[in-house]
Each structure stands twice: as structure tokens, then as C-alpha cells.
Image (cartoon, coloured by chain):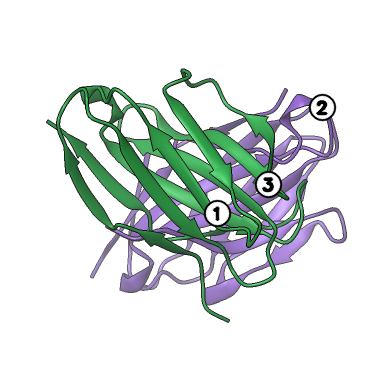
Chain colours: A purple, B green
Amino acid sequence: AQSVTQLDSHVSVSEGTPVLLRCNYSSSYSPSLFWYVQHPNKGLQLLLKYTSAATLVKGINGFEAEFKKSETSFHLTKPSAHMSDAAEYFCVVSEAGGTSYGKLTFGQGTILTVHP
Amino acid sequence: KAGVTQTPRYLIKTRGQQVTLSCSPISGHRSVSWYQQTPGQGLQFLFEYFSETQRNKGNFPGRFSGRQFSNSRSEMNVSTLELGDSALYLCASSYLVGQETQYFGPGTRLLVL
């Protein structure tokens, strides 16, 4: 079985300061991990994806995430927040086998607020 | 390439009615998945279709059903609507099943009165 826990429901930062959105996962098989972003009244946009090729994954808009197997974590970071980063972010896991194969399991989401 | 499209974008129904939502995947993608998003339950997996066959199903009642056509377009149907079915329904497509990246459409917002 697979599960995802996003450790913060809300994160607030000032424009130009670093962003850290935390995610822990659980998986019985080798997982693929994703971060998606959802702007208000929009669908989900893929930020980045981890599939075991490299533990540090770079995504769009300056975001990156590091896969740490020993800590079962996949935290999302950005060096400098921009006003347009304000949105809801979802950490997602997909398993390589078992009954969850092909099914995405989402975290509860983290709402990022960026202050001027 | 055009992205995933969903129709209609907004829908208002009353309890007891049924509704059909449509999803057209990215050209060449053969897998279509459906998700329900609500404020209380978050994003939950409904089902996944590949080559016209349902390959996986989430924990939803039988009132929720779907199908996929030979051109990979998919529909989902909800019968006997309940107030709790009010949600954003998201469709996602990928080239294959498994751990492929899924690309999402804009969603259909359903309001049940």
C-alpha cells in the first residue's frame, strides 16, 4: 500500500525568500514521486517527477526536490519565492506494483501564500 | 500537442439525477484516469482505463462508473446523484499504465442541489 503525508497544510513566505514544502511517503514497492501544483480554479500541473534516475530532481519554474530513501521524504524547495508561486501543492506517489499499480495517491495538499 | 480536455466545465444537477462527464486525452495517450477532488476528502482515485478496459478502481460506490472508447476518449457516469457528489472531477491521461506521468485536464465542477 502507498500513502503520502504533507507535513504542513499552509506555508507562508515573503517574496524573494526560500520555499520548503515537506512530504513523507510510504510505499511497498519502488515508488515514483511527483509534485503537482494547482492554481485556483485550475487543473493540476506537473512540477517535477522522481523515478530513481537521480535523487535531486529539477522541475519547472525553479523548483527542485530531493528524494531521501532513508527518511522516506521528498521535500520541494525553491530558492526564491515569486508572487506567482502562490497556489496549492500536492505531493503524489505511484507504486511499481501491487494493487495500487497505476494509481496516484495524493497528499492532502499544502497551500503556499507569498507576501509582497 | 493539445492537452487533456474535459466537457462540460461546469454542471449543476439535482439529487437523484444522473450525469455524464467526458474526457479527451492527449493525442497518443491510451490510459485515462479519473479523480474526485473535494475540500474534505482531497483528491481521490476513481478508476483507470487502458485500451477500453478498466484496470484499476478506487473505493467508490457502484453509482460511479466509466468507460473508454476505441479512440481513448473516456466518459464517467454518476447515477442517482447525492449532495456529497459535488466536487471537481479531474481526468488525467498518460501514454501507458503504471508509473507514467499523468497529465491533467482542467476538470469538471459538479454542483448537486
**Label 1 lies in what chain?**
B
Residue at position x 60%, y 53% in the image = B69
- The type of residue carrying mark 2 is Gly
User: Residue A45 at what x, y percent from top left?
Assistant: 49, 63
Using the image, determine if residue A103 lies above or below residue B25: above
Using the image, determine if residue B62 lies above or below residue A39: above
**Label 3 lies in what chain?**
B
- The type of residue carrying mark 3 is Glu
User: Residue A4 at what x, y percent from top left?
Assistant: 60, 32
Cα–Cα span, label 2 and label 1: 21 Å
Residue A21 vs residue B36, the one in the foreground = B36
- Helix or strand or loop: what does disc 2 sit on? helix
Query: Quick check: A42 left or right of B111?
Result: right
Mark 2 or 3: in front is 3
Q: Is residue A73 visible?
A: yes
> Which quarter shows the C terminus of chain B?
top left
Reading the image, the residue beneath label 2 is A98
Point out which mark residue A41 bears. none
Cα–Cα span, label 2 and label 3: 21 Å
Reading the image, the residue beneath label 1 is B92
User: Residue A78 at what x, y percent from top left?
Assistant: 53, 66
Reading the image, the residue beneath label 3 is B52
> Which quarter shows the N terminus of chain B?
bottom right
